Image: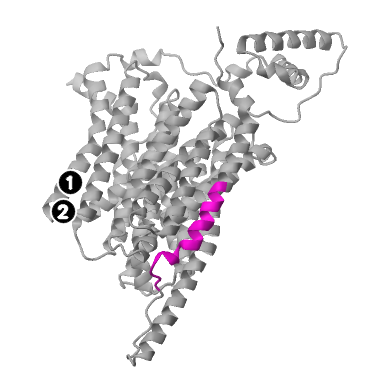
Amino acid sequence: MGTLQGKLRSFLNNRWLVFVAAMWMQSCAGIGYLFGSISPVIKSSLGYNQRQLASLGVAKDLGDSVGFLAGTLCEVLPLWAALLIGALQNLIGYGWVWLVVTGRVPVLPLWVMCILIFVGNNGETYFNTAALVSCVQNFPKNRGPVVGILKGFAGLSGAILTQLYAMIHTPDHAALIFMVAVGPFMVVIALMFIVRPVGGHRQMRPSDNSSFVFVYGVCLLLAAYLLGVMLLEDLVGLSETVTTLCTVVLLFLLLVPIVIPLLLTCYFDDISPAQEALLPVPRKEEAGESGESTEQQEVILSEVEDEKPKEVDLLPALERQKRIAQLQSRLFQAAAVGAVRVKRRRGPRRGEDFTLIQALIKADFWLLFLSLLFGSGSGLTVIDNLGQMSQSLGYGETHIFVSMISIWNFLGRIGGGYISEIIVREHAYPRAVVLAVTQVLMAVGHFLFAMGWPGTMYIGTLLIGFGYGSHWSIVPAAASELFGLKSFGALYNFLTMANPAGSLVFSGLIASGIYDHEAERQAQMHHKTRSLFGAQLGDEEPLKCEGAVCFFLSSLIMSGFCIIAVILSLILVYRTKRVYAHLYEKPRA
């Protein structure tokens, strides 16, 4: 009996259980990606035009990106309490929207609807923060894979919830809003006491690498399965029974990773808690244990950077280190006898720890921010307007494209982080070069949307989804490399503001304005045609645009801004090549 209790305690405190639970929670955390599916029913039920709908989209993006409160509460409250607050926000915000859309409560003004969307979507910032904080602490040596997988599942959540909605098979399109309100609330309430730090630095095992390979395999299998099911539903059509069976298989794939903590606890966890307590704790103060001498050495090293000839950086690694050591030795001797005055540093250098204020005066930070704004902002505009874009081109089932872009978003987050990691580790080259490549793909995707050729919705969805997802695995990693980890939370939260800023410009001003203009022009032509033939005019219907012309100009504009983002990313690559060479270049024999 005692052995069974010990195994159960070990299982509940296993960091892999926390990671799997965080994956499940993230599987329903990306509710903002479903806005393209729920926006048509909101528009038709409340009689909104495209500009009013875009205002709701901007409120959604603000709720998704403003995570300062969530980050603060996760530091001062237990994680379960922060998760509870986020779950209640999600339930109240989207639950009230559902009540309004279904006519159970009176229609509210647009600004109140914006607040409800903001509150509901802001709940997911608590889910994201709690999942990342707990798992990064539990896996201090595997931050890259952990963050990529968790952010990937958040991107995949739109496709997962859409498939669950398809299983219900209800003609009530507002039921999806009800699912968005209740589904994440139930999942988070069930898992909020599991997702927490558990002293993961003491649970490092040789099997960790194979466990991550297994999780990556499940991720790819899940994405491929969802893509196949969605294509079959769109091209062939599946019966209600087959759709239910496919959803059961989907849930099984989501449950598969639980075998990792089960196997580790039952068969491979041969280290007792008493032995784990004897394992060393990572030391945070190793870099600063020498006190005043360390500060003096940093000043000398700063002086070396100023005094060394530029051609030194072009030498092989061993020769460069030798030349720098000689220069550093001479500076130490000269400073000791007072022959030179060592200049005090005005601030950190790239690759060191910056505060947010220090980063805001650096050109590289703004290059990264603007590149993210133009690239990610244009991609988010497509996600928010995908329902109207597919309807304007004559597609009836808009949720298919919402699910597909969610899958490509997931693969972009996984693939972008993996490919950029190879670039920096194997070639010591700036991560932003991969960002530039994905922005080229996005420019092509926007161009295809503008043309509106047959089948381009599928290709454009792939390119935009993959490119958008790549931004959110590459940019945070690049920011941590260039500006350090000490104030990474503040830096990351500031960078995420590029999302609503881009959405406000591209969706709230450009895309919605052009759409409404074309819809009004088509409505006037339709009105004249009916008057000419003497048809009786009924009640005015909500403005609706049809044809590729609806998003032609706005897509071309976004394609052009993606090209500008490519140029900004390449400028950042040029400016930071020496930084990455210093951080990642391996000594040559």
Label 1 is placed on what type of residue?
A: Cys
Residue at 53% over, 46% down = 496
In the image, residue 455 sits, relative to residue 582, either above or below, namely below
CB under 8 Å between discs 1 and 2: yes
Q: Residue furthest left?
A: 241
Q: Earlier in the sequence, mark 1 or mark 2?
A: 2
Q: Is residue 516 magenta?
A: no
Q: Label 2: which residue?
A: 238
Q: Amino acid at mark 2?
A: Leu
Percent across and percent down for residue 185 are: 32, 50
Crowd rating for badge 2 (residues with CA inside 10 Å; few <14, some 14–19, many 20+):
some
Q: Is residue 208 left or right of residue 289?
A: left
Q: Residue at x 64, y 37 (%)?
A: 364
Rendering coords of residue 218 (x, y %):
27, 33
The answer to whether 341 is drawn above or below residue 108 in the figure is above
Q: Which mark is residue 47?
A: none
Residue located beneath label 1 in the image: 246
Q: Secondary structure at mark 1?
A: helix
Task: Locate residue 201: give its quadrant.
Answer: top left
Q: Residue at x 60, y 31 (%)?
A: 482
Q: Is residue 183 above or below residue 518?
A: above
Q: Main secondary structure of the magenta part?
A: helix
Q: Is residue 582 left or right of residue 184?
A: right
The residues colored magenta run 544-563
